[in-house]
Image (cartoon, rainbow, N blue to C red):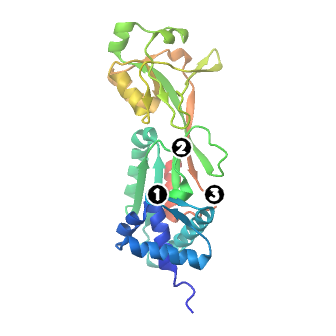
Amino acid sequence: MRRFDHLGDVEAFVTVVEKGSISGGAIALATTPSVLSRAITRLETRLGAQLMRRTTRRLSLTEAGRAYLEQTRAAFSLIEDAERAIQGQDGALSGRVRLSVSTTYGHFRLPEKLTRFCAAHPHVHVEVSITNRNVDLVAEGYDLAIRLGPLPDSGLVGRKLEDAPLRLVASPDYLKRTGTPRTIEDLAGYRCLPFFMPSTGRPAPWLFRIDGAETDWTPEGTIEIHDDVLGVVSLAEAGMGICQSYDFIVRDRIDRGSLIEILPDISGRSRPFSLVYAPHRRLSAATRTMIDFLLD
């Protein structure tokens, strides 16, 4: 009896999870939803466990499904590594890397690093999801993610990319109309542009350092920015108020004169960006190389 005649069913399961639906998996594998549905049912029967809950609107993995998904992905990664080792492409690195990254890092930090990576390794297929949502790396099939802020105790491996300095800015037109605040207390009399964190539904505090002491100040305003943090910079540049953002985002705008830094004497705080990945998944050669490029 063949030991692994069910690998097609395993591939069907992994693909459906990665694509988020049976119909999406069918398109990726050039087959029909009914074929994939039967494949997953056969696999569950073979394992004696339910791997996913299927409704008309969504799919969700069971605990058994999550564990099986992680192990089968690792197994497929081993097969891919073995094929690359035998076949090669004149020694060229190949494979696929799935990366989730926030909008701030995805627009302003990642492009330079990704350009160098793709120039050095043109045979690697890179899938980049730019979103402010914290993805589930294992359940959604991502190899790596770049996340903002201190890492929660999630069991993920975290390696710091940088501490990104923050700057308080507004447009020349806005400051011409309102005058320039001189102290942190003055900010309450100005239109501030708070960004509401998706994870908490509350405005992200502005971070300052006053006489060596770290101070968090919560901005309030009649305009609330949700979902895309880059919106605070666009609105500030349009003369709508004051925002705090990363130096790597506003530096060029300050140099061009479309934004002016406010209260530089109490700046100096930063927020960390980190690269995270699952500790128990065997990383492909392409993923390991991508990690080195991002950390460089």
* Label of residue 147 in the image: 2
Marks 3/1: CA–CA distance: 28 Å
Marks 2/3: CA–CA distance: 16 Å
* Mark 2 closeness class: few <14, some 14–19, many ≥20 residues within 10 Å: many
In primary-sequence order, the first of circles 2 and 3 is 2
In primary-sequence order, the first of circles 3 and 1 is 1
* Mark 3 closeness class: few <14, some 14–19, many ≥20 residues within 10 Å: few
Closer-to-camera residue (41/278): 41
In primary-sequence order, the first of circles 2 and 1 is 1
Residue 50, image x, y percentages: 59, 69
* Label of residue 279 in the image: 3
Identified by mark 1, the residue type is Arg
Residue 296, visible in the rendered structure: no
Identified by mark 2, the residue type is Arg
* Label of residue 58 in the image: 1
Say which element carries label 1. Answer: loop
Q: Quadrant of residue 253?
A: top left
Answer left or right for 114 relative to 185.
left
Say which element carries label 2. Answer: strand
Tell me the quadrant of the picture where the N terminus can be found: bottom right
Q: At 38% across and 69% down in the image, what residue appears?
A: 26
Say which element carries label 3. Answer: loop
Identified by mark 3, the residue type is Pro
Residue 212, image x, y percentages: 65, 18
Q: At 57% across and 77% down in the image, what residue appears?
A: 45
Residue 74, visible in the rendered structure: yes
Callouts 3 and 1 close, C-beta under 8 Å:
no
Of all residues, the one furthest to the front in this rendering is 56
125 w.r.t. 214: above or below? below
